[in-house]
């Protein structure tokens, strides 16, 4: 049974009172008539009119009691459904309600948020789902349990091990290792300006601190740096992230980079590229005080 919200409004020759609107149910109507003997049915509004200056408050209290009655009945039905066809899982605990504890997973959070009346309990460190939502929980449970199993530390470790021996995993490892070296291949005959913010394909907007004369071997790093072309000479440039002040001072390019700029390894950033870099730099600066405080401790 669904009980709707009260709508307060005068009716019938502006007499004081309020209307009550709820889904039809014979037993509910009988309880309503007992609580409000003076109530009259309005064919025009398809709702009940209760006279009196305090009618709105009285109807609100009655509807609250009915909602509680509905919840208790729905919880009882849900408990019976659980008893008849229970969910057996290490992630589910049965108490006054259903309590769910899983490793962190975005999929689990997404599924649980779609279940009516599900809520997070900070004290219990668990999601609590009333029995009235058991049928909805059953529908979402396969995805919840699968995502929880995949989020277990052993499963994560196994996936990392499998990825590390795959071609994609090796490529990702190479890219991460190369980024830590803070070097970037640039065309020897067209070097980037030192100390100014420029855009790169691999690392976004950066500042080159210096450019060495060390030649790059294209065959070794073509997978990491796609802009490197065979037959051209590239040298290593040492880079660092651009500060927010440097990004604000950088004048944007009028046009997006072309193929020649991509092949040399750097170009003047556009306004769109600068906006992304500035947003990231602001985020880093906001986190910096907290990070410094943590390091001091």
Image: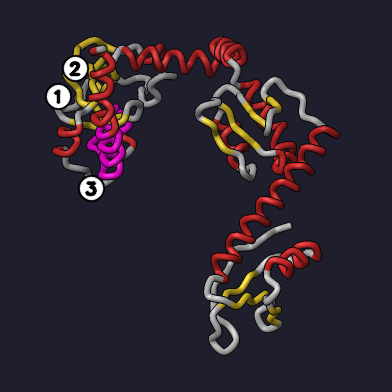
Which tag, 2 or 1, sits closer to the chain's start? 1
Q: CA distance from mark 1 to mark 3?
A: 21 Å
Q: Secondary structure at mark 2?
A: strand
Classify 256 as above or below 37. Answer: above
Residue 38 appears in the rendering: yes
Q: Earlier in the sequence, mark 3 or mark 2?
A: 2
Give the x, y percent position of residue 213: 20, 12
Residue at mark 3: 254
Q: Position of residue 141 (x, y in %)?
A: 71, 33
Q: Quadrant of residue 79?
A: top right
Residue 266 visible to an observer of this rendering: no
Seen in the picture, residue 14 relative to 36 is either above or below; the reply is below
108 is higher (above) or lower (below) than 272: above
Residue at 33%, 14% (x, y): give it: 180
Please rate how many residues cluster around mark 2, counting C-alpha atoms within 10 Å: few if below 14, some from 14 to 19, many from 20. Answer: many
Q: Residues within 10 Å of mark 1 (few under 14, many from 20)?
A: some
The percent position of residue 279, horizontal first and vertical second, equals 29, 38
Q: Which residues are magenta?
A: 261-282
Q: Nearer the viewer, residue 192 or 4?
A: 4
Among all residues in the image, which is located at the extreme right? 84
Q: Give the mark nearest the N terminus, 1 or 3.
A: 1
Question: Along the horizontal axis of the image, is 186 left or right of 164?
Answer: left
Q: Which residue is mark 1?
A: 194
Contact (Cβ within 8 Å) of mark 2 with mark 1: yes
Q: CA distance from mark 2 to mark 1?
A: 8 Å
Nearer to the camera, 242 or 187:
242
Predominant SS of the magenta segment: helix
Asked whether the beta carbons under mark 1 and mark 3 sit within 8 Å of each other, the answer is no
Residue holding disc 2: 211
Q: Is residue 265 magenta?
A: yes
Q: Residue at x 31, y 30 (%)?
A: 204
The residue under the point 58% across, 28% down is 126
């Amino acid at each position: 049974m669904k009980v709707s919200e009260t709508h307060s409004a005068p009716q019938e020759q502006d007499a004081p009172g309020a209307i009550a609107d709820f889904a039809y149910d014979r037993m509910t109507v009988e309880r309503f008539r007992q609580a409000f003997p003076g109530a009259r049915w309005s064919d025009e509004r398809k709702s009940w009119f209760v006279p009196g200056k305090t009618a709105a408050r009285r109807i609100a209290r009655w509807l609250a009691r009915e909602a509680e009655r509905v919840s208790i009945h729905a919880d009882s039905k849900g408990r019976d459904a659980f008893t008849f066809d229970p969910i057996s899982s290490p992630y589910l605990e049965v108490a006054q309600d259903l309590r769910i504890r899983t490793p962190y997973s975005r999929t689990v959070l997404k599924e649980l948020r779609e279940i009516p009346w599900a809520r997070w309990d900070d004290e219990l460190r668990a999601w609590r789902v009333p029995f009235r939502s058991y049928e909805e929980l059953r529908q979402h449970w396969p995805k919840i349990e699968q995502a929880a199993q995949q989020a277990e530390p052993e499963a994560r470790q196994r996936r990392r091990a499998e990825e590390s021996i795959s071609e994609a995993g090796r490529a990702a490892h190479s890219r991460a290792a190369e980024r830590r070296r803070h070097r970037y291949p640039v065309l020897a005959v067209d070097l980037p300006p030192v100390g100014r913010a420029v855009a790169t394909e691999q690392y976004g907007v950066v500042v080159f601190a210096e450019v060495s004369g060390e030649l790059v071997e294209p065959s070794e790093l073509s997978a990491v740096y796609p802009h490197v072309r065979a037959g051209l000479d590239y040298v290593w440039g040492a880079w660092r992230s651009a500060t927010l002040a440097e990004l604000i001072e950088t004048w944007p390019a009028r046009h997006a980079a072309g193929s020649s700029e991509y092949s040399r390894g750097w170009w003047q950033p556009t306004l769109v590229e600068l906006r992304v870099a500035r947003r990231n730099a602001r985020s880093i600066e906001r986190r910096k005080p907290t990070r410094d405080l943590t390091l001091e401790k």
